[in-house]
Amino acid sequence: MTTSENPTPDEGAATDESVATALRAGLDEFDLSDEDLALVDRDDADIAHEAALEQVPVVAVVGRPNVGKSTLVNRILGRREAVVEDVPGVTRDRVAYDAEWSGRRFTLVDTGGWAIDAKGIHLRVAEQAEIAVELADVVLFVVDAVVGATDDDAAVVKLLRRSGKPVVLVANKVDDQRFEADAAALWNLGLGQPWPVSALHGRGSGDALDAILDVLPEKSAVFGAYARGGPRRVALLGRPNVGKSSLLNRLAGSDRVVVDDVAGTTRDPVDELIELGGKEWRFVDTAGIRRRVHQTRGADFYASLRTQTALEKAEVAIVLIDASVPITEQDIRIVQQVVDAGRALVIAYNKWDLTDEERRHYLEREIERELVQIPWAPRVNVSATTGRHMDRLVPALETSLDSWDTRIPTGRLNSFLGEIVAGHPHPVRGGKQPRILFATQASTRPPRFVLFASGFIEAGYRRFVERRLREEFGFEGTPIEVSVRVREKRSRR
C-alpha cells in the first residue's frame, strides 16, 4: 500500500486515532484510579454527547405579562438568569436556557407575555403565541392564581388545545395556603390539574417540575429551533473611572447608566441587553474594583463582592484599562482575576483619544513588561467618548468565546503532544526523565487538559506545553489549564 507525503484529513485523523489508541493501551501498565479511567475513557464520545444535548426536549413558559414567568424560569434554573422587574412586558423575545431536574435535561424557553393591545390586534397576539407553542415539546402555562383566569388566558387555552402539545398548568403566586382555593378555581380552564406554585419562594415548584417530566419526550421534535443559553454574558471590569459606564452607554446608543468624573459612581451591576453585530449580548456594568476586598469599607466592600459575582456569572470579560495613564497594579490584578475565574478575556485600552505618540510608545513597553503572561488576550484600542474602534469589540468577543468553547479531539491532542515531546523531551532530573504517557481534554469553558505522566513535570515544561498548544490550536482570548497526574507503574508480583 502506498502512502502520500501529505495525508488527507481522513488519513490524518485515522493516524491520530491509532496513536491515541496505542498510548491508551500503554496506560494499562500504570496504576490508574477509577476517576483516572473515567477521564481517559471519555475520549471523543463526549463530543457526540454534547451534540446529543442539542436534541434535548424544549419546554416553553407562556402566559400573560407579569404573571411571573421569568421569576419561575429563574427558580427552575436555580440562578438569576432571566431579567425580572415588577413591570409588565420586560421579556420581549424568546430566550432559551439549559435546565435540569431529577437528572433529566431540557431546554427552558422564557417567552414574552401576550396581551390584546389597546387596538385589539388579536391576530398579532395569536401569531406570537403560535410561534412559541409551535417550537416547544411541552408548554408550561403560567396563570396568576390571585387575579384568576382572564379573557387573554382563555384565548391562549383555545390555542393550546389546537396545538395538541402537552400542557402543564401552573397557578403562580400561591405564596401560602390562603391562596390554595384560588389555584383550585383554575380547573375551570379545562387543562387538567393546576399546580399551585410560588415562583418567588419556590413553594410547589418541584411538584410542577415532576409534572413536566411526566409528559417530557426523550428527544425533541423541534431541536435546533432555539439558540441555547440565551445571550452571551459579558462583564465590564476595570478600576474606578476607566470609562466602563461610558463604554456601555456608547454601545447601547443611549445614556443607560450614570457617568461622572467622580470615581465610583456605579455601585450596583447593571444588566443591559444590547444588540451588536446582529445578535444580542447581555452586558453587566460593574462597580469599579478598588483595593483588595478586606481594605474596603461600607458600600465599596459590597460593590467589590458584587463585581466578583458578576464575573462568575459572565462568560467573557472586557477589562478596561485607561491608556492615557500608566498601567497600575490594580489593572494587572483585575486581569488576573478574570484568568483565575477561568473566563474568556478581551482587553480594551480606553481613552485612546487622550494618548499622544509618546504615551503610546510607553504603553507598549508597559504591556510587554506588566502583561507578559497574557499575550493571548485580544487587544482593542478604543475611545468610549469618540466611538473609536467600537466595531472591533464584537469580533474580539466572538474570537475569545470560540476559543473558550474549543475541544481538541483526543487523537489529535496525543498525536501533537507526541511530536513536541519527541522534539523537546523533558529534562533529566535525578537520573530520571519523566515522560507524558497520555493526554485528554477534561472540559471546555475554559479548556482544561490533563496529562498523565510517569514522573513529576516541572512548571517550566508545563508552560512550554501550554505555549505550544496555543501555537498549534489558537486558544486566543481564553485561559487554558494544564494539570499533570503522575502515575507509577504497576508492581509485578
Image (cartoon, helix red, strand yellow):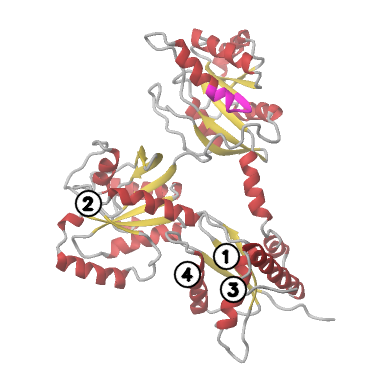
Q: Is residue 31 left or right of residue 6?
A: right
Q: Quadrant of residue 210?
A: top right
Q: What amino acid type should be assigned to the residue bearing mark 1?
A: Phe
As measured in the structure, the alpha-carbon distance from the residue carrying label 3 to the one carrying label 1 is 12 Å
Q: Does residue 119 appear in the picture of this structure?
A: yes
Query: Residue 178 location, x and y as percent?
Result: 55, 15
Label 4 – label 3 distance at C-alpha: 12 Å
Sequence order check, earlier mark of 4 and 2:
2
Which residue matches tag 3? 417
Quarter of the picture holding the C terminus = bottom right
Observer-nearest residue: 279 or 453? 279
Q: Which residues are magenta?
A: 131-139
User: Mark 2 — residue?
Assistant: 383
Where in the figure is residue 176, as x and y percent of width and height?
Answer: 55, 20
Q: Given the image, on which type of amino acid does mark 4 rest?
A: Glu
Mark 4 lies on residue: 471
Q: CA distance from mark 1 to mark 2?
A: 37 Å
> Residue 251 lies in magenta, yes or no?
no
- Horizontal and vertical percent for residue 66? 44, 21
**Residue furthest bottom as drawn:** 431
Query: Is residue 301 something one can see in this rendering?
Result: no
Instruction: Look at label 3 and name its amino acid.
Output: Leu
Secondary structure under badge 2? loop
Q: CA distance from mark 4 to mark 2?
A: 31 Å
